[in-house]
Image (spheres, rainbow, N blue to C red):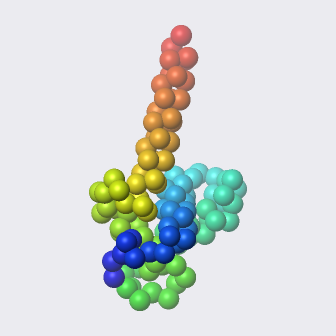
Amino acid sequence: MALNVAALPPEHVPVLQGWIFMVHHSVKCSVSPHCKYGQRCATTRELLVHQAGCANAACGTESCVQLRQIMEHFAQCASTECVLCAPIRFQVQKSRSTSLTRRRISAGARLA
């Protein structure tokens, strides 16, 4: 079942955005569960490991089906107007740009 973003109550949007953000974080986190997000990071990582082997559309594991729907929408969404995806894409892009700038500055400092 696809996620219908247009039908989402406005108060659900930040919650779903939080899930998307946490997935992006936990995939790259090397210190989970000792990072600043603590157990939330570790729980998200465990759910992602579960999902990698789960094809059950009616899975009973908490949040499995819901997170799959959210992430499938995010992966397929190309709308710059999407209330769910556009702000997250902006933050992810901004974060990547900042990281790239820091690496360039660091590399330049080592060359000097």
Q: Give whichever of 98, 86 is nearer the camera.
A: 86
- Residue positioned 64% across, 52% down in the render: 31
Where residue 86 sits in the image (x, y, percent)?
A: 40, 54
Residue placed furthest toward the top: 112
* Residue 18, placed above or below residue 101: below
* Residue 30, placed above or below residue 59: above
The reply to whether residue 50 is visible in this rendering is: no
- Residue positioned 52% across, 22% down in the render: 105
Location of the N terminus (image quadrant)? bottom left
Q: Is residue 36 left or right of residue 103?
A: right
Residue placed furthest toward the front: 10
- Residue positioned 53% across, 10% down in the render: 112
Counting every numbered tag in the picture gives 0
Where residue 76 sits in the image (x, y, percent)?
A: 30, 63
Q: Give whichever of 38, 4 is nearer the camera.
A: 4
- Residue positioned 51% across, 36% down in the render: 99
* Residue 51, placed above or below residue 25: below
Q: Give whichever of 13, 18 is nearer the camera.
A: 13
The reply to whether residue 32 is visible in this rendering is: yes
Where residue 8 sits in the image (x, y, percent)?
A: 44, 74
Q: Is residue 71 left or right of residue 42?
A: left
Where residue 63 sits in the image (x, y, percent)?
A: 52, 79
